[in-house]
Amino acid sequence: MPRTLITLLSSALLLAACGQPTTPATHSSLTTQALSGTTIDTWRKQVIYLALPDRFSNGNTGNDSAGQPNCFDRASATKFHGGDLQGLRSKLGYLRDLGATTLWLTPVYKQVGLVNGNSCGYHGYWPDYTNPNDTAIEPKLGTASDLTGLISDLHAGGQKFMMDMVANHAGYGARIVTQQPGWFHNNCTGDDVNCPLAGLPDFRQEDSAVAAYLTGLSQAWTSAYAIDGIRMDTAKHVPLNYWQTSWVPGVLQTRPNTFLLAEAFLDGSASQLRPFLDAGFDSTFAFPTRSALVSSVARNGSLDLLAGKVQDTLGTLGLNRALLQVNLLDNHDVQRFLNEPGYGVPETDIRARYSLALTALMTIPGIPQLYYGDELGMYGGNDPDNRRDMPAWAWTDAGRATAQSGYLAGGGTPKTTYDLTKQLIGIRTGNEALWKGGYAELWRPNGGQNALAFYRSSGASRMVVVLNLSDTTANLPLDLQGNGGISSTDKTYLVNGRTFTDLLGRGAPATTTVSGGKLNVSVPARTAAIYRAN
């Protein structure tokens, strides 16, 4: 909804229109993350790229029909399409060019066969577990040698590998269900922890034998492969005690300093996510922040929503843990961010909103996660439409430079979106303030112009980010010297005459100067600016 431009008629009006310097409420003691030493900063600096192996690239057509029969059909949205580990391995140069530093794959476990006559586990979340456990890879995705080679190539290129694991459930009709029927909850509904999710066989982690089996399975994978991080699926559907007393210590015993990321789809507030950090995970997905990005940016709401969630995360978790939270616009479980504005919104407006969302993703505290196709402007509704195949034209600039059906246009091409994403990743990676720095709010709408500005700093790296979602130019006097969230050391540097330059080149002018303790910026409608102190 458009906001009225606030002019600086008086200091009282300024106070009513802009966000005042706020210090998040002091958080109570939080369990220290399992990561230690330089590994903490290494993960804060990551840019995670999520891919479904089956939908990314087909590097070996010979395994398309391997394994379970009747599960390969490119015409079916719920069966395998031929993508595999060899295909991913052949496209690592694409990820490096983009700037992605961690590759997260959905599970590569061997999957159960045809379900209900029309669906197969192309996504990886229907594992065909057996007892004793094994580390069998889905034959349609490749072999143990393929996975080892992929991880080796990632490491050689300075990238990391994050494996997706499942400890909540087995696949429909998995062998272990017959082998160990007493290991599963039965005849239960309405309980997130103890009842089957979507009818999937639900493990009884409260049983010591089950706990030992599941933890042992993860240990087997971390022993067999040089895994850098683990994304744990459906973590909220498993007793917290299991994570704390069995799985986390078990995995870290086998592979110390592994980044442990919990998927707990809770989007109300950071307080809902804190129990998983207290149970030993290093991080969770910041679904509350994602919800705010959808409501504010995608659906043209107030940026007060985003500002509030960022402050809530900092206040609940503290800066050190907030910097390890994983931010996202979308993933394989929700419709793509580009579909969130709804029908009837002009694509030029959708492109403007998406550019603002990508800028926010790369500049607010936390680790950014991209979902394959985000960098191209791929549309997609709810599952399975959000899991379309990566297009063959994606791999070259020439291919991306042509308008494509099903991809964001609005005055640009997939290359336009790719280039912006690459630029934003480069800015984040190259400026320590954006991946390690503190956060001080400089401006929020408060019912006025729909713009958000904040300050990030770490050491000699100092940045000011402005997101202008309004329909008019945002002329904002950003008070640096009077902001209680900016350190005295930084204020000594941010004296009158200090210049800032917009790395995106959108500010007018691109370089602006501190005057009267304030940084006066002018950012055009529906755009963002990332200013770096000179």
Image (cartoon, rainbow, N blue to C red):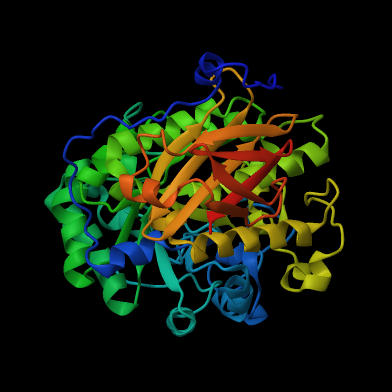
Residue 436 image point, x, y percent: 38, 56
Residue 513 image point, x, y percent: 59, 47
Q: Can residue 419 be seen in the rendering of this structure?
A: yes
Q: Can residue 336 be seen in the rendering of this structure?
A: no
Depth check, front residue: 97 or 197: 97
Residue 456 vs residue 60: left or right? left
**Rendered position, 427 above or below 339:** below
Residue 437 vs residue 124: left or right? left
Depth check, front residue: 224 or 379: 379
- Quarter where residue 187 is shown: top left
Residue at (66, 21) in percent of width and height: 7
Depth check, front residue: 40 or 138: 40
Residue at (62, 68) in percent of width and height: 98
Depth check, front residue: 401 or 106: 401
Residue at (75, 44) in percent of width and height: 351
Residue at (40, 34) in percent of width and height: 483
- Which quarter shows the N terminus? top right
**Rendered position, 144 above or below 302:** below
**Rendered position, 226 above or below 35:** below
Residue 358 image point, x, y percent: 61, 49
Residue 167 image point, x, y percent: 31, 53
